[in-house]
Amino acid sequence: MTNGLPDLTGALVVRGDVVTPAEVLPDAAVAVRGDRIAWVGDAADVPAAHRPPRPAPGTLVLPGLVDLHCHGGGGASFPDATTPDEVRRAADEHLRHGTTTLVASLVTAPRDVLLARTALLADAADAGVVAGIHLEGPFLSPARCGAQNPEDMVPGDPGLVRAVARAARGHLVTMTVAPEVPGVVGGPAAGAADGVPGADDVLRALVEAGALPSIGHTDASAQACDAAIDRAFDLLATTAGARSARATATHLFNGMRPLHHRDPGPVAACLAAAARGELVVELVADGTHLDPATVRAVVDLVGADAAVLVTDAMAAAGMPDGDYRLGPVAVRVADGVARVLEPDPEAPDGPPRPGAIAGGVAHLIDVVRATVAAGVPLVAAVRAASTTPAQVLGRPDLGALLPGRRADLVVTTADLGALRVARAGAWVA
C-alpha cells in the first residue's frame, strides 16, 4: 500500500467524474483488480505510472446499471424466445449500453408457455446472461391489461407460483400481481390440490419461493392495495432468506387505476408505502410513460432509495420503427413509441390502429438521462438505476462504485451517452 492505495500493478484504472451513491467525485479514479473494485479516490492520488490521461471534460464514470423490468431488445423478446441465442441477443443489446445486470421479464401467457419460458431464462441466469426472472402476470386485472392478453389472465393460483418457482430454480425475482384478483391475497387457494392448505395465497407462495410480490396491472382500491402491501411486508419480515424486506410496485401509474382525490386507488397506496419504507416503486421514466414532472415529484416524495428506474423495454429497443411482437400481442413502433395494434371500432374490417403503450424502447442509460433532464439530481437518478435495484435483487455486491463491489462500470459523456462498459472488470465489446 502507498498513500492508502493498493498496488496497482496490472490493475485497470478508469478516470473521470465518478458517481458514487452519495456524491460526484470530480476528476477521480476507479481501480479494478480482477472482477472487483479495489479502490476509488482522487485521480491525483494515483501514481503517475498508473494514472490514465485526463478524459474529455465532463466524462462520467457510473456504476453498471441494474434493470429490474425488461422484456427484450435488439429485435429479440424474452416472452417469445425459444433459444438461448435469442435470450442473449436481447440481454446483450442492453449490456452494450450500460445495463450490466438485467432481470428478464415475461408477460401473461398460458401455463405451459410460462413454464417453458421460465426454464429457458433459468438456463440463461445460470450462465450469467441475465440476473433473474420477472413474471408480469398472469394474476392481473383484465380491466388494466395494458399490452397483455386478458384472455390468459387467471385467478391467483399458489400451485402455479410453485411450479414456476421450480422451473426458475432459484432465479424468480418478482411477480406482478393485482391485489383484487381472487387468490392473490388470502381466500381459498387454487393450489389446495397440491397439498397446500386452503388458507394459502399467491403472496405467501411467492415469498416462500424467494421472490417478491409486485403490485401492478390493478384496478384495486387503495384499501385492497394497503392490505396486500401490509401482508407482503409481514411475510418478507418473517420469512428466512427473503430477497428483500420490501415488495415492489410494477411501473407505478402505468397499468393502474388513476389517482383521484376521492378514489386514491393503488397509486396513493403505493406512494404512501414507499414513503414509509415498506415498498419500492418502479418508474418507466423514459419521457413516454410518465410526464417528467411526475417522475420528479415521485423521487422528491419517496427518495431514490424507494424508487427504481426501469425500461419495460421490448424487442424494439435499439431497433428502428416497425412492427414487433410482445408475447401474443402485435406491436407497432412509430416515432420511438411502441403501441398495441388493435381493431379500429369505427372500421372493424379495416387495418388495426395503434392503441395502448406496449412497453418501452429505451435503454436504461436513456431513462437515467431523461430523469436528470426532468430535474432529478444526477446522484439520485443513478442510485435509482443501480444501488436501489441491486438492493431489491438482494445483491449487495452490485450497484455502486465502492471497494469490494463487482467491477461494473459505465463511462459516459457529460450528457450521459455511453462510451464504454465494463462488466466484472472486463470491457464489453
Image (cartoon, rainbow, N blue to C red):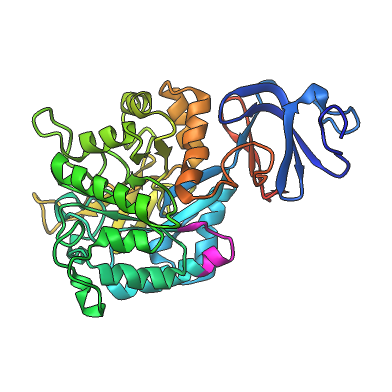
Image quadrant assignment for residue 165? bottom left
Quarter of the N terminus within the rendering:
top right
At a point 52% along the width and 58% down the height, the residue shown is 130
> Is residue 378 left or right of 160 when viewed as pictured?
right
At a point 54% along the width and 59% down the height, the residue shown is 89
Residue 138 appears in the rendering: no
The percent position of residue 202, horizontal first and vertical second, equals 25, 61
The percent position of residue 409, horizontal first and vertical second, equals 64, 40
Q: Toward the viewer: 201 or 120?
A: 201
Residue 243 appears in the rendering: yes
Look at the image and give the residue range highlighted in magenta.
123-132
> Is residue 18 left or right of 318 when viewed as pictured?
right
- Asked if residue 126 lies in the magenta stretch, the reply is yes
Q: Toward the viewer: 144 or 37?
A: 37
The percent position of residue 223, horizontal first and vertical second, equals 14, 42
> Is residue 235 left or right of 45 when viewed as pictured?
left
Q: How many marks on residues? A: 0
The percent position of residue 246, horizontal first and vertical second, equals 37, 45
At a point 31% along the width and 67% down the height, the residue shown is 161
Q: Toward the viewer: 285 or 334?
A: 285
